[in-house]
Image (cartoon, rainbow, N blue to C red):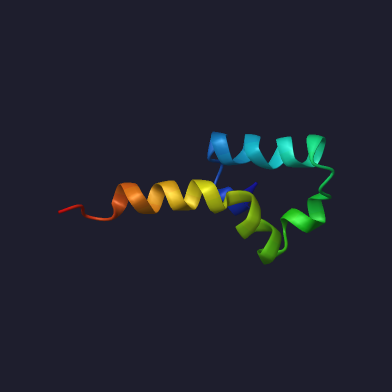
Amino acid sequence: MMLVDGHPFLVRLAIYNVANINIILTQILQNTTILNIYADNLRRQSLILTPQP
């Protein structure tokens, strides 16, 4: 899982999507599917890293 640099939560999220959402692994490796799967996590990280007044 070089795609997520071994991050345990992101690896687990990918496996969950393959097992429960019926997403094929090759779909996860496509950029559009990656953005859909990891969008919530990326949004959360962005909020954490964005300076708040």
Please state the total of marks drawn on the protein image.
Answer: 0
Q: Residue at x 70, y 59 (%)?
A: 33
At which x and y percent is residue 7?
53, 40
Left or right: where 37 falls relative to 51: right
Determine the residue positioned at 74% across, 41% down. Answer: 17
Relative to 17, say whether 34 is above or below. Answer: below
> Can you name the residue that lies furthest to the bottom here?
31
Q: Position of residue 45 (x, y in %)?
A: 40, 48
* Residue at the image position 66 percent from the left and 65 percent from the top: 31
Residue at the image position 32 percent from the left and 46 percent from the top: 48
Of residues 51 and 53, the one drawn nearer to the viewer in this rendering: 53
Q: Nearer the viewer, residue 34 or 53?
A: 53
The residue most toward the left is 53
Please tell me whether residue 40 is drawn above or below residue 31 in the rendered image.
above
Q: Quadrant of residue 9?
A: top right
- Quadrant including the C terminus: bottom left
- 20 on left or right of 51: right
Percent position of residue 4, x then y: 57, 49
Q: Position of residue 20 (x, y in %)?
A: 80, 35
User: Which residue is most to the front?
Assistant: 53
Query: In the picture provided, is 47 more to the left or to the right than 27?
Result: left
